[in-house]
Image (cartoon, rainbow, N blue to C red):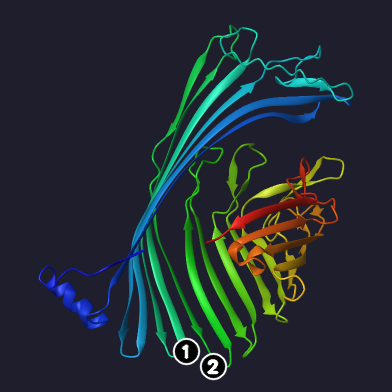
Amino acid sequence: SVKVPVLSPSSIPTIWEEIQDLTGPNRFLNFSQVFRWEQSTRDNQTMILDGMYTDRIAALDPWEMRNKNTVAGLDSRLYGKFNIGKVENTWVVGSDFRQYDYKWNVIADKTPGYNGYPGEDGYYLVDIFNPHNDYSRCVDIHSSKCETWNGTYNYSYFQEGVYFQDQIKWKGLSVLLGGRQDWVNTHYHGTVYSNRTDDHSITLTRLSDAPRPQTAFTWRAGLIYNFAFGLSPYFSYSTSFIPQSGSDWQGRPQPPLKGQQKEVGIKYKVPGRDILITAAAYDIDETNYLVTDYLHPGYSANAGRVNAKGFEVAANANITHDLRLIASYSYNSMTYASTNLTAAAQLPDGGYGPAASEKGKYVQGVPRNMFSFFLNYSMPKNIIPGLAVNDGMRYVGFTYDDAVNTFKVPAYYLFDIGMHYDFGQKIPILKGLQAQLAVSNLTNKYYVASCGGNYACYIGQGRRVYGNLSYSW
């Protein structure tokens, strides 16, 4: 940020007089501006296992995808301070925009038959007990030997907002008031070429939707009181607005995700000690919460309103001059509070039972209990100056793998260790140079991180050793 003096009184006398009354003749306005531009690409060639054709013959679905993302954003703001009597105000007003462009190109080879086996729905079939690695793909759309399609999809997203905030302080009381107005527009268009016709002629399908403008005003307010003996109770309320792209299976645009959050808590700084203890309870409502539509693959369904209630406690403390502790525990009960969706209960044999309502069920993939602690010990300077060792544990409670809570994904806990060395503690000329070595999942524990229904589960990260060397100046 840069300091920008206000304009001369002769140019804008009315504004100058108002600012001078509030800030005094020697105050400045602050101006800050941040610009960001980023572009990334990804190429992905995949053979997806799409099921078993027989006891030993697997169906493979080949895909090739190329993605290109471009993001640009600019945030400009004015901010400053002024006093009204003994009341301090720290204010900010600003405007920002973000432009997001996403281009996705996909080639799908659906040539039936492979390795002498008849094709089923255009999949490659392979003997899992005698596999081959020569899965040459037939992707030439002009060839009569190939059945393929090539799709290009372009999605653009633009959001602009103006915002304000004022932090008001009087003695031990602080009040925060803020708001934001957003304007959002999205647009989508694409083309699909395919030769899946009787004579392998090429067909062209154009896909497009009209721009989808949306607008919303969100706000937040909070207060905290700092007692002299270190206790600080607080309360906050906020609303949220997040546009959601895409359409449901009937082509209807997805509505924005809207929410509101109430939170109450306390913070306690132990007098004379480097110890901070915090505790908070919250109640969050979100409407238009999207979930995977299992009846229509590739689409999302609106699950209505979800509610999350919970609390969390944390401690950050220097137990001794050399030993530091960070620990936290959280409980989160997130349920489908109001929904018309139903889902079939999954059976152990892979089949499905009767449909059940999702209302009142826990949201899949969200653990109710999580706990972690981390210890860092710095060696005394008379032993090994600059060296510190650390260890910790993470616990994640069980989750449900579907919206009607049929199966549980087991809880798991992991151990981590590490060390870091500050070269400047021993050699002053190397001040700012640090080395770090860390090991996550120390015991190489085998665990399931999450599941998506009864068809796919994801194995957690095994033991990982990594290090880095950094220099700061």
In this view of the protein, can residue 334 be seen by the observer? yes
Q: Indicate left or right for 398 with 177 as reference.
A: right
- Going 17% across and 78% down the picture, which residue do you hit? 17
Q: Quadrant of the N terminus?
A: bottom left
On the picture, is 348 further left or further right than 32? right
Up/down of 46 relative to 228, above or below: above
Q: Secondary structure at mark 1?
A: loop
Q: Name the residue beneath numbered marker 2.
A: 228
Q: Is 228 displayed left or right of 357 in the figure?
A: left
Q: Residue at x 63, y 79 (%)?
A: 278
Marks 2 and 1, how far apart in space?
8 Å
Q: In the image shown, does 187 or 16 lie closer to the viewer?
A: 16
Kindly indicate the quadrant of the structure image that contains residue 304: bottom right
Can see residue 397?
no
The residue at 65%/27% (across/down) is 63
The residue lying toward the viewer, choosing from 321 and 432, is: 432
Find residue 428 and name its label. none
User: In the picture, residue 458 is in which quadrant?
Assistant: top right
List x then y, in percent, for residue 256: 48, 52
Q: What element does badge 2 sit on? A: loop
Disc 2 crowd rating (10 Å Cα; few below 14, some 14-19, many 20+) is: few
Query: Where residue 260 sits in the image (x, y, percent)?
Result: 51, 66
Residue 3 picture location, percent across and down: 30, 67
Q: Residue furthest bottom?
A: 228
- x, y percent for residue 205: 48, 22
Q: Are marks 2 and 1 in contact (CB under 8 Å)?
A: yes
Foreground: 426 or 336? 426
Residue at screen point 67% across, 61% down: 335
Q: Amino acid at mark 2?
A: Ala
- Mark 1, residue position: 172
Q: Amino acid at mark 1?
A: Gly
